[in-house]
Image: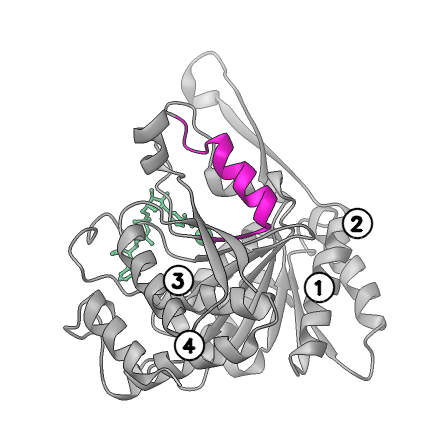
Amino acid sequence: QKIPATLIPGDGIGPEISEAVVRILKEVEAPFEWDHQLAGMAAVDASGDPLPKATIESIRKTGLALKGPLTTPVGGGFKSINVTLRKEFELFANLRPARTLVPGGRYEDIDLVLFRENLEGYYAALEHYIPADGDPKGIAISTGYNSRKEARRIVTYAFEYAVKNNRKKVTIVHKANILKLLTGLFLEEGREVAKQYEGRIAMDERIVDACAMQLVMNPYQFDVIVTTNLFGDILSDQIAGLIGGLGMAPGANIGEKAAIFEAVHGSAPDIAGKGVANPVALLMAAGLMLQHIGRKDLADRVQAGIDGAFGAGVRTRDLGGQAGTKDLTDAIVQHLR
Ligand code: NAI
Ligand code: MG
């Protein structure tokens, strides 16, 4: 039984790492039937539109996409493609797990999951500039908003994830001491949701700045973290740093009708086309995609390949080694269970 899915190779290192991932998925006989589509600079070059209608229609049909990193063209009035996709398909939950895969890094045995609210907060980007006579007096204003509905939905999603994945604790991260309304509402709704899980999943609260410090001092006190859009953006890169950097961090944008899986990193123009990019972040995103369609068995096989390759000492340059994309991919294929 084939499952149609949209494949967007992306820009920069995107095509190289997508090719590696598709090859590994083929090896484990993942049931995806790929519909290849363009977005980002590749799409601008082909059609002048960074997010062509055909790409949106494909995702609407399949409800499932694996997306390489996209270069957001600077200037020209282009909106962020990622933000547009999240809005278009109401992808309310952004899942970003961080787990130690390579021993000998800053920390051993990190295993954290962060959920970021994906539609609201300051990412609403309702911005304007009030000019004044003489520039030094000009001010920029940005209006963020959080709704009770989305706060409830993302925190519930995080707790449900905790239940299904045997997690013990959910930490709600906020800044309700200063942004009393904007993030106070998030905290209030979070506390309400947490009550329904009392006795099953523990609830904890942290102010975002203290949380950032504690993540460095003692990351082991955290299990699942749930927070608003901008804080989640920042903290998810921070937790990627705990486990060896962006080359190791997958992400999933999940809605009720569609889900888009991607690496947390960007198109890495500095190393594009050199065959040295680490494909693991996108591969782990594909692993999340396999779990999403109920094929944890295949996700486990892929994970065994990754663990086996790293266990054998194969390291790309971002991990301090010499292996190229193809070397690591070959090693992963050899270790698939
Ligand atoms: P970046 O994540 O592309 O690169 C940051 C650094 O990490 C670079 O030194 C790069 O070589 C390295 N790196 C990233 N991924 C790697 C991998 N898989 N293997 C080895 N090294 C890796 O961030 P940057 O440079 O800020 O952004 C470049 C472009 O990507 C921009 O146009 C940005 O808008 C876009 N971007 C797209 C994202 C997406 O589509 N989800 C997310 C973040 C940025
Ligand atoms: Mg980010």
- Asked whether residue 116 appears in the rendered view, the answer is yes
Outermost residue on the front side: it is 1
Q: Does the closest atom of ligand 1 sit within 8 Å of the Cβ of label 3?
A: yes
Crowding at label 2, few (<14), some or many (≥20) Cα neighbours within 10 Å? few
Crowding at label 3, few (<14), some or many (≥20) Cα neighbours within 10 Å? many
Crowding at label 1, few (<14), some or many (≥20) Cα neighbours within 10 Å? some
Which picture quadrant has residue 312? bottom left
Q: Which residue is mark 4?
A: 302
Residue occupying image coordinates x 69% and y 77%: 164
Coloring scheme used? one colour
Residue occupying image coordinates x 42% and y 22%: 136
Instruction: Tell me the number on the disc at residue 148.
Output: 2
Name the amino acid type tagged 4.
Val
* Residue in the foreground of this view, choosing between 156 and 331: 331
Closest to the camera, between mark 2 and mark 1, is 1
Q: Is residue 86 above or below residue 336?
A: above
Q: CA distance from mark 3 to mark 1?
A: 23 Å
Give percent across and percent down for residue 18.
34, 57
Q: Range of the magenta residues? A: 49-66
Residue occupying image coordinates x 81% and y 76%: 197
Is residue 94 located in the magenta-colored stretch of the structure?
Answer: no
Q: Which residue is mark 1?
A: 157
Name the amino acid type tagged 2.
Arg
Q: Is residue 137 above or below residue 25?
A: above
Q: Which residue is mark 3?
A: 282
Q: CA distance from mark 2 to mark 3?
A: 33 Å
